[in-house]
Image (cartoon, grey):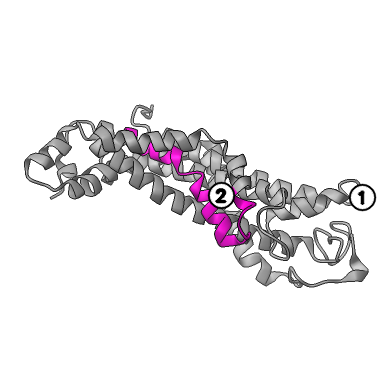
């Protein structure tokens, strides 16, 4: 039996993570529910939508260049090459969302490992790791991203790694603070007194009880990654054509802001919806998983 299961000290047991009170609090957060539904709808549209459209994102119809939205067979109009904007928007969503989720998973893996080790061992090891985190946080992420991306060949995998490499530090600080607090609780002390190894205490006792803030951080990290991909692609250092992303769709549309504004408005709305929805979900999870917020 895990020592977490017999804890009565007020630590947030992992098995209560999706407890009924937490779920009720989340459902009461209307913006979080809206964000969840928007993320599901956006993901399904990007995954399934391109298969349902009559045009692919690479189909060129010169005769239909700059077609207005809702004025013909192209629902959201066409771009300067006559390509269907809706098809490109959904394919770009696949890339942008994939970059966001992949970068989040890598950043979370790095941040959790660094924070777990730093919080558990403290001392010289913990201080050295956290000073590394502080040093990384000293550099503005946008400038660090642009400086590194200018030195490498841009591609989807390289952009994912770049974004992950500049977004794990906040996760490490959150995890380090949680682990440092939890290791003083009785269930962790009991595990140590029963001869449990450091590895077991870290991964079986402490880490499961730090899941709540980690999940919140992961949700917000996806929003950050999508936004980061968008602005480095907009500046020309991210995903390169012909591979579409919401960021490079904005970059290619800036020359047509007056003549074809929908080319910039539509990907801008997609970015706004995705980032805002993930932030809403993160806020809802933070409130739902806070044990101090009791139901009336």
- Label pair 2/1, CB-CB below 8 angstroms: no
The residue that appears at 66% across and 48% down in the rendered structure is 232
List the residue tagged with mark 2: 37
List the residue tagged with mark 1: 259
Indicate the quadrant containing the C terminus: top left, top right, bottom left or bottom right. Answer: top left
Residue 248 is situated, as x and y percent measured from the top left of the image, at 72, 54
Name which quarter of the figure residue 238 lies in. bottom right
Horizontal arrangement in the rendering, residue 210 relative to residue 69 (left or right): left
SS for dot 1 = loop
Name which quarter of the figure residue 3 lies in. top left
The residue that appears at 11% across and 38% down in the rendered structure is 190
The residue that appears at 19% across and 32% down in the rendered structure is 185
> What are the residue bounds of the magenta stretch?
148-177
On whether residue 170 falls in the magenta region, the answer is yes
Q: Can residue 19 be seen in this view?
A: no
Per the model, the C-alpha gap separating discs 2 and 1 is: 34 Å
Vertical position of residue 61 compared to residue 68: above or below: below
Q: Report the number of discs.
A: 2
Q: Can residue 115 be seen in this view?
A: yes
């Amino acid at each position: 039996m895990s020592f977490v299961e017999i804890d009565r000290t007020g630590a947030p047991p992992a098995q209560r993570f999706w407890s009924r009170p937490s779920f009720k609090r989340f459902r009461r957060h209307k913006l979080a529910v809206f964000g969840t539904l928007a993320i599901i709808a956006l993901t399904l549209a990007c995954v399934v939508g391109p298969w349902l459209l009559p045009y692919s994102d690479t189909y060129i119809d010169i005769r239909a260049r700059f077609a207005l939205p809702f004025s013909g067979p192209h629902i959201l109009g066409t771009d300067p090459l006559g390509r269907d904007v809706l098809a490109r928007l959904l394919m770009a969503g696949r890339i942008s969302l994939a970059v966001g989720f992949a970068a989040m998973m890598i950043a979370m893996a790095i941040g959790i490992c660094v924070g777990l080790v730093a919080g558990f061992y403290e001392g010289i090891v913990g201080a050295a790791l956290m000073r590394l985190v502080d040093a990384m946080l000293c550099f503005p992420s946008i400038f660090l991203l642009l400086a590194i991306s200018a030195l490498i060949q841009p591609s989807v995998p390289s952009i994912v790694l770049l974004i992950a490499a500049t977004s794990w530090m906040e996760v490490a600080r959150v995890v380090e603070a949680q682990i440092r607090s939890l290791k003083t609780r009785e269930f962790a002390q009991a595990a140590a007194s029963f001869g449990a190894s450091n590895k077991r205490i870290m991964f079986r006792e402490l880490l499961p009880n730090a899941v709540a803030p980690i999940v919140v951080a992961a949700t917000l990290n996806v929003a950050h990654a999508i936004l980061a991909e968008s602005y480095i692609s907009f500046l020309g250092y991210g995903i390169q054509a012909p591979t579409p992303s919401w960021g490079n769709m904005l970059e290619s549309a800036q020359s047509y802001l007056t003549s074809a504004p929908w080319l910039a408005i539509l990907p801008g709305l997609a970015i706004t919806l995705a980032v805002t929805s993930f932030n809403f979900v993160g806020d809802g999870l933070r409130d739902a998983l806070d044990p101090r917020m009791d139901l009336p």
